[in-house]
Amino acid sequence: MSSTETMLAARWHPPSFDIRVESVPIPQIQDPDDAIVKVTLAGLCGSDLHVYRGEIAVPKIHISGHEFIGEIIQLGSNYGPNAPSTETSSQTSTETSTETSTETSPRPALYSTLKLADKVVAPFSVSCGACAPCRTGYTSRCLSSLLFGSPRLDGGQAHDAASWVGVHTGGGGGGGNDVEVGEGEVGEGEVDVGKLLRGINDSSLLLLSDILPTGVFGAKQLLGHPKMQPALTGIAWPACLSPPSTSLTNTQTATPALTPLTPSDRLITLALIGLGPVGVCASIALLDELARRGLPYKIVAIDLNEGRREKMRRIYEVIGADGKGGDGEFVVAGPEEAKEVVRRWTAGVGCNAVLEVVGHNSALTTAYELVRAFGVITSVGVHAPKSLPFTGQQLYDKNISLDFGRCPARAMIPDAFRLLVKRQDVFGGVGTETSLIDRVTGIGEATEMYRAFEKGQIGKVLFDPWK
Amino acid sequence: MSSTETMLAARWHPPSFDIRVESVPIPQIQDPDDAIVKVTLAGLCGSDLHVYRGEIAVPKIHISGHEFIGEIIQLGSNYGPNAPSTETSSQTSTETSTETSTETSPRPALYSTLKLADKVVAPFSVSCGACAPCRTGYTSRCLSSLLFGSPRLDGGQAHDAASWVGVHTGGGGGGGNDVEVGEGEVGEGEVDVGKLLRGINDSSLLLLSDILPTGVFGAKQLLGHPKMQPALTGIAWPACLSPPSTSLTNTQTATPALTPLTPSDRLITLALIGLGPVGVCASIALLDELARRGLPYKIVAIDLNEGRREKMRRIYEVIGADGKGGDGEFVVAGPEEAKEVVRRWTAGVGCNAVLEVVGHNSALTTAYELVRAFGVITSVGVHAPKSLPFTGQQLYDKNISLDFGRCPARAMIPDAFRLLVKRQDVFGGVGTETSLIDRVTGIGEATEMYRAFEKGQIGKVLFDPWK
């Protein structure tokens, strides 16, 4: 193709409520690290609404959409069998000095394994796979991170006879970014992902771009928090953190024992605020993890919108029905009813933790009211530049812990993929009573879809650029 | 003694800067859960200054002082060999239903073991030892918690020919509160605390009331945070949280591996803000834990006051000299120099975590500037009712986690006691270049000591009511 060829794309126009379907040039390889992806599906995500409503000011026109899957149709010159491999980089890295934490390691394995026609999922932000945050698994804060569908990196809501997204990272190394889910040799003890893929609905793969990893991330952060460990393990703080340094903690002579934990102390009571697609994913991830670990739970899932609440109830019916939902109670409610439910469950003490999937101060305020002292509030919502609705004294008085931030989608995809395969009964559908995806439509309808999505008239929409 | 007997006490008078030494009635047993303690030492603590300065409004006159040690001279009728034991309560608790999380368990062992003439340390807040938060180890948020030296519970800065503090909790159960450190049988595999006690300076026991447990609490919270685990374990997020659910994460077919962690990713870089007595304790606790685990570190310890910085340097010289200080670098600096140090150490990325021991928004702002993306800010400072100095977007953009709140001193004392014994070289002194305790004086000097302490003219002061 020549550089004068064009495609249709959904483009954001500032300041607000303005998505236009326009003809734009097809992207070209500009950097040896670039790849060109033929988009097969692109998603519309709740966090797009912050920009759409003008709550987060984005002054530059760009192609929207940070969720997409597709096929590799062109690769820059840094890819291929001669690219530096992971094994090489591993050997080198052990000889690295500890002087700085930001030396760049040799590029990750993807540079040598990615091939034309590979099916790929784009984690919603670009990560090089080789810098210090990437090595640590904190890929959403890669030192050369960019968000797809933002002024500095066009998104995936694009279409034409030839429809591509240029996956380039300005020389930061795009090699860690794309995730290959369908190819490769299957070694001993490994899972045949190709075989797993054949059993799952193609459109559900799109959920791996953002919302399913984000839900899994929230659930993992929440359940992994130290303040949750007494309830999860039955061992009181601080012994739950690590083995005691001496037997002092076990002797009456050091400090007489407190009363041991009771079964009621080990009941996990949680609230989840926001039942958009990410909130549903987070609920499923929480239920899956609690069931796998055999932990008893009571969860209240909260949304203002009755349509969302009803869908969550139906999804829980599916999950509960197959016996994989674990041993617990799952109630879907509005915020005020939820406060009453938590009061009843915990005799006024509050729940162990709250997962906030909205990205709004009102949700944080509700979370603070619902959570007990020494409770955890994990937020995976995108927040605006507004002061937090707490004072330092309020947080001190309840010993609150808070987690904020963007999901490192690249690092979370293995766990998210496992859950995607396991729960195709809820993730696999389109347009059903229990599906997260309401509709698959053409890119030409983008303007109308954004409008309806913002008004809550439809749920998650995918664009098939070839439709 | 009759109820008309009096003693001298340091009393707080609202609204600010007003401590008076006054004659007050000697406390009496009012509730079967009460104990009367003859105070042998009471401390003046940095957090007393929030009230003293009027930053936290406390409108009622009361005896000040939340740190004290002493001797049991009178016990309510609920104490004695026939009190419910821990073993009984343990047996009962396993049969408890999971319906509510706030049922009260039988009282803890202290009710049956506490005797007249026992030496006790008062954790700075009262905890019953039997409610759900207490069982969980979250004793600072006991359902019937009260702070010593507050309008609802007089403190320990009291003196007369007969000097006592009434340790009563209004029927909430005072049994879990006092900590017996010197008595009891020594069983097989247990530590002979009585023997350990004979080797330590009596005045250093006072540090167990608040500042040493609080320092240990901060260090444990910080190093126990999930976001610290990749650096501590060398395993990237999220695998560091738990074993992978399937071998998917290990196969190139699921997601090609990111570049492995390098030694530089495992260097623990920390900042600690505030070098008052709690900050010094927190530094020592951090260094001890890092040394015990053989972890390389770089720590910058920050204070505005050069006198405090100089003391911290001398203490680190002591700790480093005996080879128990671990393998690292410890720099003491002002805030601006510290930012430069962290930039140099981390090539601009920021430190893994910051421990905030000040309780002021300026310290939280400095912490935000110093910490890297996916960093942890652990605050053990007492905060005022002011909005936090962050927006939700700022916390989202750096994936920040925050911990706030009061140390559960009762639960932290075993670990704090171990450290107290181990580091008598720094904790045991009074009035030396490296000691945390500057002076032991009579209660009659309380007015002047508060004044000088508030102005930073003296460090930690203990009152010996019998001096």
Image: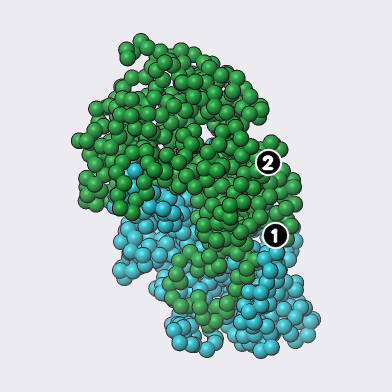
Chain colours: A cyan, B green
**Alpha carbon of mark 1 to alpha carbon of mark 2: how far?**
23 Å
The residue sitting at 54% across, 87% down in the picture is A184
Task: Residue type at mark 1: give it.
Answer: Thr
- Give the image location of residue B415, x and y in percent: 45, 47
Check the residue under mark 2 and report the chain it is in.
B
| Mark 2 burial class by Cα count in 10 Å: few <14, some 14-19, many 20+ | many
- Determine the image quadrant of residue A255: top left
The extreme left residue here reads B82
Q: Residue B101 or B124: which is nearer the viewer? A: B124
Q: Secondary structure at mark 2?
A: helix
Q: Is residue A214 above or below residue B355?
A: below
Q: Residue A439 or A292: which is nearer the viewer? A: A292
Residue indicated by mark 1: B346
The extreme top residue here reads B4
The residue sitting at 58% across, 47% down in the picture is B283
B445 lies left or right of B176: right
Q: Residue A250 or A43: which is nearer the viewer? A: A250
Residue indicated by mark 2: B309
- Give the image location of residue B94, x and y in percent: 24, 52
